[in-house]
Image (cartoon, rainbow, N blue to C red):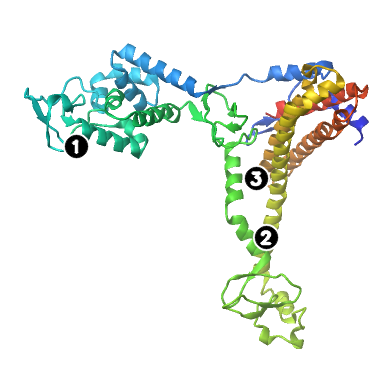
């Protein structure tokens, strides 16, 4: 389609038929809604785009840095400590057990305080009464120590500082289990709090313990998760209650809150899980082996035919020679069986139906592999295109925007429509990529549904390709120009219009 047609398509959005809606339970999307859902009018200054963006729901997540996590954790500990009139160490123990839910701690405490204390080792008074002598015996090493060198948890069991330090250090080295540390006495369940740990171990062990405690605030909390991007240290607090699980971290990685896979809306998590498992499973390797190889009649190892002759020789140590067509021994073949390039024995047996089941299985495997390859190639191609678009967006922001601003003599704020276009390309590539996973699992017998889906998919892909080509190719002439160009205004209108079309399809789909 030439550029004039592109301009027409970009500005004539209202020609789309809004009377009939498309809805899929599996995908959870409406490609075309009623006029009441989204009012679209793409004019100058991207007013249409702004209205669509305004129609999107507010973010239902909050990105947390380490300082935010510490602040929230301290606030929760302080809240529980104040309301229940217990130490901060005891408060952190309770919150840890109740997955950092302040309301659940309050509910359990006021329902049965004694039960909570007994369950989590928060004793009101010692269970062991120490003698008033100046020396006490450590319960681990059984050495006598001055009273000042003995430490006890709330239970009162005496242990020397060295044994305490070794016990706690070993627990911290073993991992996050140190957060539920109990008294070393096997018969005692008294909790050992952070205050006692801080007093007895080194600064390094204290930092490790504090780190475990900080991470538990995210990992044990039902409403928070770490960003799954490699090397990212941000956490996400999910505050929404709808089915929009898409999260965009400050590291620029987008993921699904529900399954923590890459953001895949509008495709559901179940489809994504099946698709990822299929891509990584050995089933497709087996399909390829079944479709493109045959087992050696002697050792049963799969053999791939890589030459034209039907004379096959298995690899050592087997070295069995056989016919590719009938799998019979090659020594039984000659001019009477058709020679090197045919096998009358196979043709006769085939006519009698001897190979019907084997051929049927091989044909099914071949068709299945070809179908999977069709969808996988397009899924992977859109993924590669998205990665390239991300790189182009970064280059546009860091290099080309300033250069284009100097050439066209316009402030960078007036060129934001270009980065908007690239952002939309990145997002549409993501959506389009996952439509191929959805299409793969769409039941074959639902012909009308499949036909309509493929029509919508084709329209979306066509619109995206026009936008991508405009942003990638037509922009180059203005980046290499010597000065301002009158055609840049037309380019602005065209790119903004194509961006609006893509944005409209994305908003109605999601």
Q: Is mark 3 on a helix, strand or loop?
A: loop
Q: Going from the N terminus, do you reach mark 2 or mark 3 first?
A: 2
- The nearer-to-camera label among 3 and 1 is 1
What residue sits 10% from the left and 25% below the top? 130
Q: Going from the N terminus, do you reach mark 3 or mark 1 first?
A: 1
Q: Where residue 177 appears, x then y in whole percent? A: 34, 35
Res. 178 image quadrant: top left
Q: Please name the residue that numbered disc 1 is placed on.
A: 186
Q: What element carries label 2?
A: helix
Q: Going from the N terminus, do you reach mark 1 or mark 2 first?
A: 1
Whether 90 is drawn above or below 347: the answer is above
Within 10 Å of disc 3 (Cα), the crowding (few <14, some 14-19, many 20+) is few
- The nearer-to-camera label among 1 and 2 is 1
> Of 181 and 205, which appears nearest the observer?
205
Q: Can residue 432 be seen in this view?
A: no
- Quarter of the image for the C terminus: give it: top right
Whether 327 is drawn above or below 286: the answer is below
What residue sits 53% from the left and 27% below the top? 234
Whether 460 is drawn above or below 504: the answer is below
Q: Residue 441 carries which label?
A: 3
State yes or no: discs 2 and 3 in contact (Cβ < 8 Å).
no
Q: Where residue 210 appears, x then y in whole percent? A: 38, 27
Q: Where residue 355 appears, x then y in whole percent? A: 67, 72
Q: Is residue 127 visible?
A: yes
> Of 104 and 90, which appears nearest the observer?
90
Whether 36 is drawn above or below 141: the answer is above
Q: Residue 364 carries which label?
A: 2
Q: Kindly report the distance in space between the C-alpha atoms of the residues bearing marks 1 and 2.
A: 63 Å
């Amino acid at each position: 389609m030439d550029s004039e047609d592109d301009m027409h398509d970009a500005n004539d959005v209202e020609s789309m038929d809004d009377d009939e809606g498309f809805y899929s339970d599996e995908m959870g999307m409406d490609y075309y809604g009623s006029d009441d859902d989204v009012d679209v009018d793409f004019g100058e200054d991207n007013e249409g785009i702004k209205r669509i963006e305004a129609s999107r729901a507010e973010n239902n997540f909050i990105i947390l840095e380490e300082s935010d996590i510490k602040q929230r954790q301290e606030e929760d500990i302080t809240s529980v400590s104040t309301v229940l009139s217990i130490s901060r160490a005891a408060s952190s123990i309770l919150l840890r057990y109740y997955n950092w839910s302040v309301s659940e701690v309050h509910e359990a405490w006021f329902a049965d305080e004694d039960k909570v204390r007994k369950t989590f080792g928060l004793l009101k008074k010692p269970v062991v009464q120490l003698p008033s002598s100046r020396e006490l015996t450590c319960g681990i090493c059984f050495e006598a120590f001055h009273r000042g060198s003995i430490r006890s948890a709330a239970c009162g069991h005496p242990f020397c500082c060295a044994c305490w330090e070794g016990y706690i250090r070993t627990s911290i080295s073993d991992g996050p289990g140190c957060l539920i540390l109990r008294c070393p006495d096997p018969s005692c369940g008294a909790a050992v709090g952070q205050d006692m740990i801080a007093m007895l171990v080194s600064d390094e062990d204290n930092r490790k313990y504090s780190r475990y405690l900080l991470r538990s605030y995210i990992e044990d909390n039902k409403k928070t998760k770490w960003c799954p991007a490699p090397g990212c240290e941000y956490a996400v607090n999910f505050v929404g209650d709808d089915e929009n699980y898409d999260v965009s971290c400050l590291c620029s990685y987008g993921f699904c809150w529900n399954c923590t896979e890459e953001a895949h809306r509008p495709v559901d998590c179940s489809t994504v899980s099946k698709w990822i498992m299929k891509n990584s499973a050995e089933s497709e390797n087996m399909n390829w082996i079944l479709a493109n190889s045959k087992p050696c009649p002697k050792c049963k190892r799969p053999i791939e035919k890589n030459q034209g002759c039907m004379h096959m020789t298995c690899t050592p140590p087997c070295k069995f020679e056989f016919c590719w067509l009938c799998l019979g021994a090659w020594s039984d073949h000659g001019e009477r069986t058709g020679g090197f390039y045919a096998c009358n024995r196979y043709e006769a047996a085939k006519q009698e139906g001897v190979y019907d089941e084997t051929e049927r299985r091989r044909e099914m495997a071949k068709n299945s592999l070809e179908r999977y390859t069709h969808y996988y190639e397009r899924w992977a191609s859109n993924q590669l295109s998205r990665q390239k678009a991300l790189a182009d967006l970064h280059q546009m922001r860091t290099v080309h925007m300033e250069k284009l601003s100097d050439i066209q003599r316009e402030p960078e704020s007036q060129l934001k429509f270009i980065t908007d276009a690239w952002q939309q390309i990145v997002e549409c590539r993501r959506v389009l990529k996952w439509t191929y996973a959805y299409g793969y699992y769409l039941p074959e017998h639902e012909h009308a549904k499949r036909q309509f889906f493929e029509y919508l998919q084709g329209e979306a892909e066509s619109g995206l390709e026009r936008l991508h080509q405009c942003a990638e190719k037509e922009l180059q002439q203005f980046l290499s120009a010597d000065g301002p160009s009158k055609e840049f205004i037309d380019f602005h209108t065209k790119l903004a219009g194509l961006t609006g079309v893509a944005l409209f399809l994305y908003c109605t789909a999601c």
